[in-house]
Image: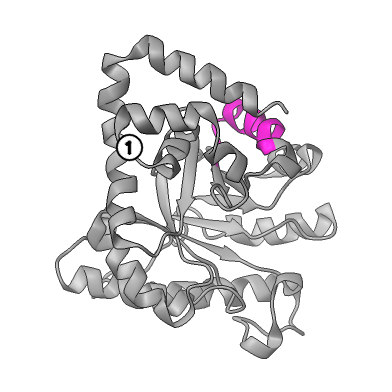
């Protein structure tokens, strides 16, 4: 099958981890504020995927958005990332392939959001590589069997070994459209993985972008961009990363004002950059120098 890596992935996704009972209200607010991309997981330990589905369903029923206007991304999480005491979307004793099928079935039920329409997922992400490449590929083969109808594209998260990513890319019938990783100094700010993604037309999605990087938030180029554009330092950091190309941000803010201002900053930066090309290049160069430390 031809590669599906060119599918559109928005520049900013609303992250739904760790929101517990507030998940439904916050996701609905995010959609009302303008988010059109949602990231979740079939992992009750950290996500409430069913409540995300409720919020999407409510937004559609209220006429705020249509399903085709949304990018919905969820994950298959292996047993290593689950907590049986908090529920799981599959039988932990089932064969690996059956675990994947059951998890996908659960996610599709949660996102049966449009009356009369078959549910689908814009992207299904493997939450992390399994202990062996053989096991990882077993999962990947099952995921591939759902593309392009019930699942439109595939991705992988928490892959910090370039050799693992290269192996998956080389052995997959359908290559990943997305790689979602932590963004922090401990993993070299993802430079090696991001470089591979950019070369192969894979979108790099970063999480922990703010919480793991107080030194970047306090840096001179981030502060200068924030001051010159009249935006928050958080939004300035987001924009400096997004403008690298092929980079999307997971934004999990619970603040309504921040939801709106962070999204608005993307277009605001486009306008500012068009009028300040030299200054933009200068700030980007200064920012890049921070990522080699």
Residue 18 visible in image: yes
Q: Looking at the figure, which quarter contains the C terminus?
A: top right
**At x 64% / y 82%, what residue is drawn?**
90
Taking 214 as reference, is 228 above or below it? above
Q: Magenta residues: mostly which secondary structure?
A: helix
User: In this view of the protein, which residue sits in the foreground, 10 or 170?
Assistant: 10
The quarter of the picture where residue 165 lies is top right
Taking 280 as reference, is 126 above or below it? below
User: In this view of the protein, which residue sits in the foreground, 191 or 64?
Assistant: 191
Q: Is residue 192 magenta?
A: yes
Across and down, in percent, residue 33 comes to 25, 57
**At x 68% / y 90%, what residue is drawn?**
85
Horizontal side, residue 93 vs residue 208: left or right = right
Residue at the limit of the structure toward the right, as seen here:
132
Which residue bears the numbered disc 1? 266
Residue 35 visible in image: no
Q: Which residues are magenta?
A: 189-204
Q: Looking at the figure, which quarter contains the N terminus?
A: top right
Horizontal side, residue 42 vs residue 168: left or right = left
Across and down, in percent, residue 91 comes to 68, 85
Horizontal side, residue 266 vs residue 46: left or right = left
Residue at the limit of the structure toward the left, as seen here:
63
Q: Secondary structure at mark 1?
A: helix
**At x 34% / y 78%, what residue is drawn?**
54
Q: Callout 1: 10 Å neighbours few (<14), some, many (20+)?
A: some
User: In this view of the protein, which residue sits in the foreground, 30 or 203?
Assistant: 30
Figure coloring = one colour
Across and down, in percent, residue 102 comes to 59, 77
**At x 69% / y 52%, what residue is drawn?**
158
């Amino acid at each position: 099958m031809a590669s599906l890596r060119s599918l559109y992935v928005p520049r900013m996704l609303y992250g739904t981890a760790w929101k517990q009972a507030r998940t439904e209200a916050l996701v609905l607010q995010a959609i009302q504020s303008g988010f059109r991309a949602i990231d979740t997981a079939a992992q009750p330990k950290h996500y409430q995927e069913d409540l995300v589905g409720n919020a999407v369903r409510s937004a559609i029923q209220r006429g705020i958005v249509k399903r085709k206007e949304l990018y919905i991304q969820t994950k298959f999480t292996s047993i290593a990332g689950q907590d049986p005491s908090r529920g799981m979307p599959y039988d932990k004793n089932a064969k690996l392939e059956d675990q994947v099928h059951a998890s996908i079935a659960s996610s599709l039920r949660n996102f049966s959001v449009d009356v009369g329409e078959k549910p689908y997922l814009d992207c299904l992400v493997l939450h992390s590589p399994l202990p062996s490449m053989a096991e990882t590929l077993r999962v990947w083969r099952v995921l591939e069997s759902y593309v392009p109808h019930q699942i439109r594209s595939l991705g992988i998260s928490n892959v910090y070994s370039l050799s693992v990513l290269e192996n998956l890319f080389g052995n997959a019938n359908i290559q990943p459209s997305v790689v979602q990783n932590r963004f922090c100094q401990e993993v070299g700010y993802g430079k090696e993985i991001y470089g591979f993604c950019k070369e192969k037309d894979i979108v790099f999605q970063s999480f922990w972008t703010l919480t793991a990087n107080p030194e970047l938030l306090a840096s001179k180029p981030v502060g200068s961009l924030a001051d010159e554009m009249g935006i928050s330092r958080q939004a300035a950091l987001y924009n400096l990363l997004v403008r690298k190309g092929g980079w999307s941000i997971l934004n999990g803010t619970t603040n309504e004002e921040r939801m709106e201002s962070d999204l608005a900053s993307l277009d605001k930066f486009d306008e500012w950059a068009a009028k300040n090309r030299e200054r933009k290049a200068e700030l980007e160069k200064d920012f890049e120098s921070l990522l080699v430390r």
